[in-house]
Amino acid sequence: MTETRQREDIVRFARSIFERGLTFGSTGNISVRTEDGWLMTPTGSSMGDLDPARISKLDAQGNHIDGDAPTKEAFLHTAMYGKRSDAQAIVHLHSTHSVAVSCLHHVNKADVLPPLTAYYVMRIGTLPLIDYYAPGDIKLAKAVEEMASDHHAVLLANHGPVVAGKSLADAVYATEELEETAKLFLMLQNLNTAPLTDAQVAELRARFGGKV
């Protein structure tokens, strides 16, 4: 895929995410791996109004070499890429329901959301909660890095999800599945729910490898 096409895809998916209310203002960021580095959405930009020519380009060492200045959360992306050679794209949002779940006190930090649906298991697998760090704190990158080898999706406490995919479409769809499952989880609070059984989850993981 050409870099021009990658830039166009970032703009297209970002606008779709914004128009459906999954991000707002200048929150959220997207990155895509290129042959010689990464493309990332610029700092302070709205996902609903990106210019493909102004998307940030970073070299393989993470240095900004072209376009507007990259997202201030670029370190989250590079930390995840460093541990996941299969990752071709990463989406990080401050999506409302996922952030709401990340603020709850009683969640299982090793796997935040229960397996409510098959597609959540297939697209996300398990979702660890990363402890809270202030925006820009390099300790957050270290915490993400420690989880990234075993998890392509993590949830940052009081912040939001970071999701890697084998393509930009995969990363976006998985992020959307996470957000919808977070919404279901909140809707079902205090109700007697029936998530998938351990055996059903194991069958899905055996068939689909934990995500599609």
Image (cartoon, rainbow, N blue to C red):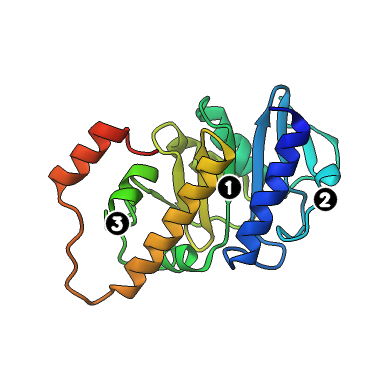
Disc nearest the viewer among 2 and 1: 2
Judge left or right: residue 159 versus residue 150: right
Count residues near mark 3 (Cα–Cα under 10 Å), then give few for <14, some for 14-19, many for 20+.
Answer: few
Q: Quadrant of residue 20?
A: bottom right
Residue drawn at x 31%, y 46% as measured from the top left:
121
Q: Which residue is mark 1?
A: 91
Assign the N terminus to one quadrant of the image: top right
Q: Residue furthest bottom?
A: 190
Q: Percent from the top left, x then y, of residue 53? A: 85, 43
Query: What secondary structure is marked by label 3?
Result: loop
Count residues near mark 1 (Cα–Cα under 10 Å), then give few for <14, some for 14-19, many for 20+.
Answer: many
User: Which mark, by number, is residue 51?
Assistant: 2
Q: CA distance from mark 1 to mark 3?
A: 23 Å
Say whether disc 1 or disc 3 marks the residue closer to the N-terminus. 1
The amino acid type, in three-letter code, at marker 2 is Asp
Q: Which residue is mark 3?
A: 108
Q: CA distance from mark 2 to mark 3?
A: 40 Å
Judge left or right: residue 55 versus residue 101: right
Assign the C terminus to one quadrant of the image: top left
